[in-house]
Amino acid sequence: MGLTDIFFGGVPMHAQEPIELTKGVPGKPCPIAQTLDLIGTKWTFLIIRDLLIEGTLRFSQLQKSMKGISPKTLSLRLKELEDNGLLERKVYAEVPPRVEYSLTEKGKRLEGVFIELKRFGLDLKADH
């Protein structure tokens, strides 16, 4: 495997069955639209990015990393990710309480998407 191989869920993308891009059909939503509904907001995307890079972070670390996000918005986005199985919230029985956030295996499967977005962004930068 080369350095440019893309992995989804620990499996090289070329080893998975090919998927054709399609739109949703009546009565069945588009999988791409569903994914964007979940991760498409600016803050949600940045939360996932930071957790892919750092592994595990506390609330204050996430908030510091994302300049301009309110605590309420960060809490809401973290809860949405947890409710959808992309994020794990671990509470430690300490005083003061310590809470850490990390991606689940399902959340880590987005790494290939983020790598391709970075590659695209680098290409955009090179074009200008």
Image (cartoon, helix red, strand yellow):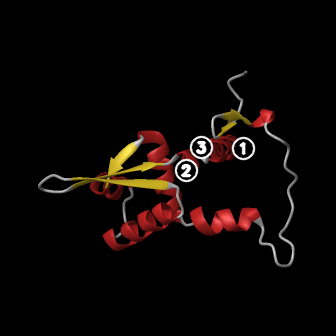
Using a 10 Å C-alpha cutoff, classify the residue at mark 2 as few (fewer than 14 neighbours), some (14 to 19) or many (20 or more): many
Residue 65 lies, in percent from the top left, at: 36, 52
As measured in the structure, the alpha-carbon distance from the residue carrying label 3 to the one carrying label 1 is 24 Å
The residue located at (48%, 67%) in the rendering is 80
Front residue of this view, candidates 65 and 53? 53
Residue 92 lies, in percent from the top left, at: 23, 51
Mark toward the viewer: 2 or 3 = 2
Image disc number at residue 8: none
Q: Amino acid at mark 2?
A: Gly
Left or right of 56 in this view: 95: left
Toward the front, the furthest residue is 93
Dot 3 or dot 1: first in sequence order is 3
Q: Amino acid at mark 3?
A: Glu
Judging from the image, what secondary structure is the residue with disc 2 in?
Answer: helix
Judging from the image, what secondary structure is the residue with disc 3 in?
Answer: helix
The residue tagged 3 is 111
The residue located at (85%, 67%) in the rendering is 23
Against 98, is 82 above or below?
below
The residue tagged 1 is 127
Q: Amino acid at mark 1?
A: Asp
